[in-house]
Image (tube, rainbow, N blue to C red):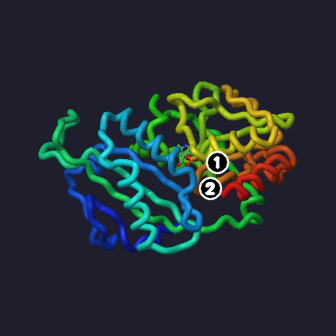
Amino acid sequence: MSNAANVVYLNGQYLPVEEATVSVMDRGFLFGDGVYEVVPVFGNKLLRLEEHLTRLQNSLNRISLPNPYSHDEWLGIFSNLLEKNTGEDRAIYLQISRGVYAKRDLSIKAGYPPTVFAMVLQVEPPDLEVVSAGISVITVDDFRWGACDIKSTSLVANVMLRQQATEANVDDAILVKNGMLSEGTASNVFLVKNNVLITPPTGHKLLPGITRDLVIEIAKNNAILVEEREIREAELFSADEIWMTSSTREIAPVISLNDEIVATGVAGEMWKRVMGLYQQYK
Ligand SMILES: Cc1ncc(COP(=O)(O)O)c(C=O)c1O
């Protein structure tokens, strides 16, 4: 994904990205003390906007940061940004940090305005042929904290985990905590076994992906069996299919795991079916 955004939103103003700056005392910069969202946009349609705003509210609640804007105020900002940054497939990136305090101090204090930033990301439309070629992944130890349901801007652990994948010359990593799958470095994970779609349950161990929920909804609406349950790492190696899902990646089939071919080594029949349904929904 490239960031071709020209005009961004910062604290009530629309500015060229080069002119949008924040203080070095911003708690987002000092502590990663903030949350974010990425909302995909197709044409001018914000995909699953309500769900994204609900997850944003949940993230804000979890870090005790009041939502600076109403639903309609957010919508107004998104519409203005999309008007100023035209394109086909895009995404809205937004982040809210706890703002600027005079002193570097972990304690939360009332009365400081948050820093609110939003921009448009230009997204490459997925080439289905390329996507169906699949991705390669490794399993890595998920050493992250016990609050992965917060879409926090403190992403250094995810950066480190992605780097393990990069150093292994693969596209991504599947994170494993105490022998159980959690998610990808920036995606959720699904297995297909005997025509059943299986994914780990939501909770503090993973981000409740909006794409994850949509895939589950689409599957259930089409009489595909879905199980939300803990998945042992060993189940990966006998899966018929493995997928990684996210708003920007959509549904990526995994064709190589720890240097071994997954099942037949090509995108599976269930993936073809659900990906087709997902594209229709979009
Ligand atoms: C850690 C993590 N898990 C899952 C997801 C997928 O979430 P969504 O489908 O809402 O994009 C993301 C997206 O960035 C993520 O960062």
Image coords of residue 9 (percent x, y): 33, 63
Going by the numbered disc 2, the residue's amino acid type is: Arg
Q: Is mark 2 within 8 Å of ligand 1?
A: yes
Residue behind mark 1: 245
Which residue is depicted at the point 52% across and 68% down? 122
Which is nearer the eye, 17 or 105? 17
Image coords of residue 95 (percent x, y): 37, 52
Going by the numbered disc 1, the residue's amino acid type is: Thr
Which residue is depicted at the point 49% across and 35% down? 149
Q: Quadrant of the C terminus?
A: bottom right
Left or right side of 2 for 105: left
10 Å crowding of disc 1: few (<14), some (14-19), many (20+):
many
Question: Could you tell me how far apart the alpha carbons at marks 2 and 1 are, in whole angstroms?
Answer: 6 Å
Residue behind mark 2: 249
Q: Are marks 2 and 1 in contact (CB under 8 Å)?
A: yes
10 Å crowding of disc 2: few (<14), some (14-19), many (20+):
some
Q: At numbered mark 1, what does the secondary structure look like: helix, strand or loop?
A: strand
Which residue is depicted at the point 43% across and 36% down? 58
Left or right side of 205 for 171: right
Vertical relation: 157 (above or below) 13 = above
Left or right side of 268 for 198: left
| Marker disc for residue 157 | none
Q: At numbered mark 2, what does the secondary structure look like: helix, strand or loop?
A: loop
Image coords of residue 74 (percent x, y): 38, 54
Q: For residue 20, which quarter of the picture?
A: bottom left
Which is nearer the eye, 206 or 257? 206
Q: Is mark 1 within 8 Å of ligand 1?
A: yes
Q: For residue 34, which quarter of the picture?
A: top left
Q: Quadrant of the N terminus?
A: bottom right
Vertical relation: 36 (above or below) 58 = below
Vertical relation: 51 (above or below) 182 = below
Q: For residue 133, which quarter of the picture?
A: bottom right
